[in-house]
Image (cartoon, coloured by chain):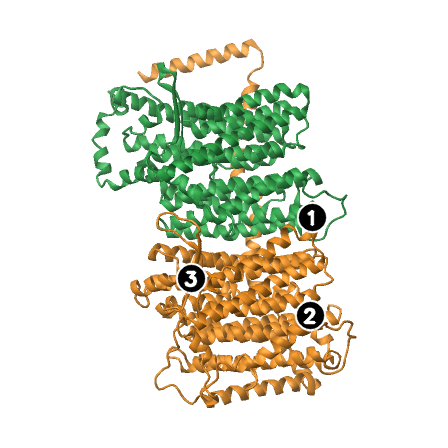
Chain colours: A green, B orange
């Protein structure tokens, strides 16, 4: 039941926060903060619990689960379960949830109740995505996080918000539709094969598919996740959405929403279609490497500070895509660390950019210069996260990128070398960003206030997290080990069997989809 | 005592943390005490640790302290672990000692700066990173220190961030070195994937076991590590960042860009010498890079006007000597030259700092002159440093270390007459450009009034370094001069001795006399041209071909120009052309198509019934026609 509470707390907290708005904005803010803090507390309890259990390491990878009938006629169940991977992501969600509420404390001054309602519902939807193990339920949460996010961008965004919101909605909605089709296809094939029509993850995972069908279904999932990730060439919604969203929206988008794509690849694409995924891996890895370098190039080109940070996500998530499809243990662990660290470092950068543009009322770097003189602490923290962004050792992102590259080297040395160029081009944009905003002569401006107590506390938490992950990431690696081991076993089963394709071939004639087609032809 | 080894890098790190987090509550004196004190304590501990290692050497001649396991993924389990062996021992003692002196100097030198605290915070972080680099037990931790010193170099070059020129220089330094660092990172991927560990000692053992001499893997690994080394040590073709790095405060140039960080590449190659021995082709490249760099940079140093840029090119050139030594297998000679160079080059920079301060931030040596009377102590110490740099025979440290390199460039089994000749030509250039600075700055007529004389915090480091620039070389002397070999004896357990070629080993004394006379001719030439009778040479200098050559050398052989055209400008051009992302434009194209078809189709909705009726009729006819003609 604790899993349901993880989703229900922000869900109910959002409604309550909206209701208490009539008593004053401050009530809404505190109710929201309490709700997300409670969520974080709950996730932390689960973590301590998990840390204890892993030392025994006797039970399987699933720590907690909840399985109730929902719509039995269609084989749909309310099935939630948590392993180390989802626990880490839920922790990240709650952590960034607290920060995004705190970041909106002074920024949001209109429709405060509805804002917090939307924000908390997005968080609830994201938590649901990370926990759902019924494919229908997963799709339900997938869509649930989309609509309030649309409102966050469209109502509280900047100048060009409507364009960005519609673009965001169209990209994710269309790709989500492809995933729905793939889910239904899988449901249908599994039902015809076994007679049991179900959306349950564990039962669908064993579905035997002819390679071509598997490839099509895999692509349905892959495109949905690639749009969210985002991978080149379906990344173009991201800079607009991130730039136009309010700070909390950008933090949630970059820190969490993108991670649902990464999570989907790890949880669904590879386990459900291991053969197709490994056949598709070269294409995905090339896209990943293009994304790493191209994203960094575009980041460098921007004048809008927020847009610059947005494009860095394209580059960083390229490492995630690369690691997932490289598929070695080291690379997969790197992916997990990269997911967490990107959430923290990019979340921090968006909060900092928000704090800065709240003070100077512009995001255009051509109008910024020399801010180090007036706000050295904002400068120092921004510098730290810019360094994290370029993968400086000692900070968490380095561990992620290094492990991904090290793990990929075994699979493809040339791609690793090209991806390593990402380390150089990321240096370029990170340094140029700091240079254009904080260095140079200070232009005449009304004096700016440095970090307030609230902002300093947020930054302290983020800095501590990124340094901890950089110097001692072992707790994260331990937690992710069991799920990743299982993932690799799944991949190894398919790849190791030398007659894999031959064994699948006779299946083809027996498959309902092919029979169906031959009937039509006749 | 050895168990306190971790404190050697931890103390400066603690200094950095204190200065950063609570330093704003401290008065200037408190900042100075923490900044200098942390490094000085670290130096004392380093010396104590060194002493206890030497008194009671363990069987393996090295001591490893494991602090914690950084991360563990399968068989990849790098540790945060420090190793003290003779090589890292020399490095930490020299680094902490020179750093402590330069920190002391900075207390006075930076006294008037508004960002006094930030300066010492960065400097302490640098010392901590440098110590991690040289103490690291595995390549990943070494890489952490490697990037850490790069970061501090960036922060300190751009220390006076209000001037965009300084920031541009800082960015350039970081980006150029990062190109090399990335090559090094790929080298680390290769080494771990092939050999299954990153701990340096077992890694070298496995490489020697598994890879035959000249094998492709060994060549690739050595070449990639060399990429990192040339970036950090400002050797060809990545040398362009160092002259610009002089934008930083002078103590920074002395510590980071002369004495310590820029020699990290030398340390890396010496540390992984097994790989280079396994890859003779790459080792030859090391020697050639060293020889070419020392000549190129020597020529450029000859024509610079900015006193710090002369010293910067001189640093590039002297590190070229170290690479030359590494390339011929004279491992301990390279480290020996690192040590003496750290003393005399730090001294020269500190002296230059005094001169620049005294003359109201004047960098141009042609506007200086006659300072030997006004700044006597600075003059004498600068003269000693210059003599050591130019390798004045017998009485300077630089002579003994450079002599060892030149001799081994000739006598080593992989040495050659060409490499030796390049080294000798280089020492001629060194003598000319060094004494050009001495004569122009300290002799002749005084052109500017001295406004500021150095106090004790500046005098002490100058005197100590001057003494070391003389006596630092007596630990290792040639055969005909007592043949002291303390240094190579110390290194023997870590670095293999240079193998002497049979039959080529001529008379060392003869070679020394040749090198020494070439160097003396250089000083005399400098005297003639810049002090004795400068007018006689003005016509030569004005000749079009000579002037063009001077401009070419002044601009560092056009490397900046080339990189700007080939790399920087195309990158910036593409980025700016593609600011709106060509891929996004294609999606906009789809959106435009949708809107266009909407406009077209909505025109049909005119609301006139006869048009609709006509449309229905036409449609019906077409469908009927299709049905009829298909059957």
Comparing A471 with A518, the one in front is: A471
Which image quadrant is residue B223 in? bottom left
Residue A431 position in % (x across, y down): 59, 52
Q: Is residue B194 above or below residue B496?
A: above
Disc 3 from disc 2: Cα separation: 36 Å
Residue B338 position in % (x across, y down): 51, 73
Frontmost of labels 2 and 1 is 2
Q: Residue at x 71, y 85 (%)?
A: B535
Residue B457 disc label: 2
Question: Helix or strand or loop: what does disc 1 sit on?
Answer: helix
- Position of A512 compared to B304: left or right? left
Q: Earlier in the sequence, mark 3 or mark 2?
A: 3
Q: Are marks 3 and 2 on the same chain?
A: yes
List the residue tagged with mark 3: B64
How many numbered callouts? 3
- Position of A213 compared to B128: left or right? left
Q: Residue at x 53, y 45 (%)?
A: A466
Q: Is residue A522 above or below residue B400?
A: above
């Amino acid at each position: 039941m604790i899993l349901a509470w993880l989703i229900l707390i922000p869900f109910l907290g959002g409604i309550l926060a909206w209701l208490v708005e009539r008593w004053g904005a401050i009530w809404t803010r505190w109710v929201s903060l309490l709700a997300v803090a409670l969520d974080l507390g709950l996730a932390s309890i689960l973590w301590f619990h998990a840390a204890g259990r892993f030392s025994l390491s006797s039970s399987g990878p699933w720590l907690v689960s909840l399985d109730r009938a929902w719509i039995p006629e269609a084989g749909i169940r309310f099935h939630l379960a948590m392993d180390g991977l989802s626990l880490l992501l839920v922790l990240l969600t709650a952590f960034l949830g607290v920060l995004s509420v705190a970041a909106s404390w002074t920024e949001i001054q209109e429709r405060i109740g509805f804002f917090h309602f939307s924000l908390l519902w997005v968080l609830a939807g994201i938590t649901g995505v990370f926990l759902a193990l019924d494919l229908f339920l997963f799709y339900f949460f997938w869509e649930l996080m989309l609509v309030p996010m649309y409102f966050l961008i469209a109502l509280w965004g900047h100048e060009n918000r409507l364009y960005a919101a519609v673009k965001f909605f169209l990209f994710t909605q269309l790709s989500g539709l492809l995933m729905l089709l793939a889910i239904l296809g899988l449901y249908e094939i599994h039902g015809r094969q076994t007679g049991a029509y179900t959306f349950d993850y564990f039962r669908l995972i064993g579905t035997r598919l002819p390679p071509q069908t598997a490839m099509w279904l895999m692509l349905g999932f892959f495109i949905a996740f690639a749009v969210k990730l985002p991978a080149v060439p379906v990344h173009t919604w991201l800079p607009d959405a991130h730039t136009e969203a309010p700070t909390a929206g950008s933090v949630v988008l970059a820190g969490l929403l993108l991670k649902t794509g990464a999570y989907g690849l790890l949880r669904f694409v590879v386990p459900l279609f291991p053969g197709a995924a490994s056949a598709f891996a070269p294409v995905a890895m090339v896209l990943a490497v293009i994304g790493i370098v191209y994203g960094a190039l575009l980041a460098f080109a921007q004048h809008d500070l927020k847009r610059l940070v947005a494009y860095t996500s394209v580059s960083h998530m390229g490492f995630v895509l690369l690691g997932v499809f490289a598929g070695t243990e080291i690379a997969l662990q790197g992916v997990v660390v990269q997911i967490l660290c990107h959430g923290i470092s990019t979340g921090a950068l968006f909060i900092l950019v928000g704090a800065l543009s709240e003070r100077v009322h512009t995001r255009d770097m051509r109008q910024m210069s020399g801010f180090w003189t007036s706000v050295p602490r904002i400068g120092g923290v921004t510098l730290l996260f810019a360094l994290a962004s370029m993968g400086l050792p000692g900070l968490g992102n380095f561990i992620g990128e290094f492990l991904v590259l090290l793990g990929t080297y075994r699979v493809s040395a040339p791609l690793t070398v090209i991806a390593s160029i990402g380390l150089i081009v990321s240096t370029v944009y990170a340094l140029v960003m700091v240079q254009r905003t904080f260095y140079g002569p200070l232009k005449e401006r009304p004096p700016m206030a440095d970090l307030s107590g609230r902002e300093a506390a947020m930054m302290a938490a983020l800095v501590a997290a990124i340094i901890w992950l950089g110097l001692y990431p072992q707790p994260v690696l331990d937690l992710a080990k069991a799920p990743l081991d299982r993932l690799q076993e799944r991949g190894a089963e398919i790849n190791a069997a030398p007659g894999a394709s031959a064994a699948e071939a006779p299946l083809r004639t027996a498959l309902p989809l092919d029979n169906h087609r031959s009937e039509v032809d006749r | 005592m050895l168990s306190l080894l971790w404190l050697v890098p931890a103390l400066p790190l603690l200094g950095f943390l204190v200065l950063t987090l609570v330093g704003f509550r401290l008065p200037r004196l408190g900042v100075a005490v923490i900044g200098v004190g942390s490094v000085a304590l670290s130096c004392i501990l380093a010396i104590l640790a060194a002493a206890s290692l030497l008194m009671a050497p363990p069987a393996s001649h090295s001591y490893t302290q494991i602090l914690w396991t950084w991360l563990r993924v399968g068989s990849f389990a790098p540790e945060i672990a420090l190793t003290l062996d003779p090589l890292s021992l020399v490095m930490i003692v020299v680094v902490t000692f020179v750093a402590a002196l330069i920190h002391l100097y900075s207390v006075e030198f930076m006294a008037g700066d508004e960002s006094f605290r930030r300066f010492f915070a960065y400097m302490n972080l640098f010392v901590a990173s440098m110590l991690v680099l040289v103490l690291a037990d595995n390549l990943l931790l070494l890489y952490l220190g490697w990037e850490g010193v790069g970061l501090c170099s960036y922060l300190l070059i751009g220390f006076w961030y209000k001037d965009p020129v300084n920031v541009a220089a800082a960015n350039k330094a970081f980006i150029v070195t990062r190109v090399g660092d990335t090559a090094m990172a790929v080298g680390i991927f290769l080494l771990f994937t092939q050999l299954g560990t990153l701990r340096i000692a077992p890694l070298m053992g496995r490489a020697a076991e598994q890879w035959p001499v000249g094998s492709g893997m060994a060549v690739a690994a050595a070449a990639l590590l060399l990429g990192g080394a040339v970036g950090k040590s400002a050797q060809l073709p990545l040398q362009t960042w160092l002259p610009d790095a002089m934008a930083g405060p002078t103590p920074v140039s002395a510590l980071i860009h002369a004495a310590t960080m820029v020699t990290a590449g030398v340390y890396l190659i010496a540390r992984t010498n097994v790989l280079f021995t396994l890859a003779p082709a790459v080792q030859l490249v090391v020697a050639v890079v060293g020889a070419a760099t020392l000549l190129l940079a020597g020529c450029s140093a000859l024509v610079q006007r900015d006193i710090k840029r002369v010293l910067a090119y001189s640093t590039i050139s002297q590190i070229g000597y170290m690479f030359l030594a590494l390339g011929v297998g004279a491992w301990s000679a390279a480290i020996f030259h690192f040590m003496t160079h750290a003393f005399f080059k730090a001294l020269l920079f500190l002296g230059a700092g005094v001169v620049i301060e005294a003359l109201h931030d004047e960098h141009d040596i042609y506007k200086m002159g006659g300072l030997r009377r006004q700044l006597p102590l600075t003059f004498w110490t600068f003269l000693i440093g210059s003599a050591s740099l130019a390798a004045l025979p017998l009485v300077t440290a630089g002579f003994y270390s450079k002599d060892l390199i030149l001799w081994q460039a000739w006598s080593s089994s992989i040495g050659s007459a060409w490499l030796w000749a390049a080294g000798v030509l280089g020492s001629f250039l060194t003598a000319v450009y060094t004494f050009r600075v001495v004569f122009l700055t300290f002799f002749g007529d005084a052109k500017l009034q001295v406004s500021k004389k150095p106090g004790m915090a500046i005098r002490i480091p100058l005197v100590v370094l001057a003494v070391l620039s003389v006596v630092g070389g007596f630990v290792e002397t040639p055969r005909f001069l007592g043949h002291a070999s303390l240094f190579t004896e110390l290194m023997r357990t870590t670095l293999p001795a240079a193998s002497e070629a049979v039959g080529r080993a001529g008379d060392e004394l003869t070679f020394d006399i040749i090198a020494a006379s070439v160097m003396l001719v250089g000083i005399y030439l400098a005297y003639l041209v810049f002090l004795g009778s400068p007018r006689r040479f003005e016509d030569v200098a004005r000749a079009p071909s000579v002037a063009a050559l001077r401009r070419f050398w002044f601009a560092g052989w056009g490397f900046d120009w080339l990189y700007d055209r080939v790399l920087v400008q195309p990158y910036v051009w593409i980025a700016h052309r593609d600011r709106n992302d060509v891929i996004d434009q294609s999606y906009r194209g789809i959106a435009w198509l949708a809107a266009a078809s909407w406009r077209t189709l909505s025109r049909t909705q005119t609301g006139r019934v006869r048009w609709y009726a006509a449309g229905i009729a036409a449609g019906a006819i077409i469908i009927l026609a299709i049905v009829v003609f298909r059957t």
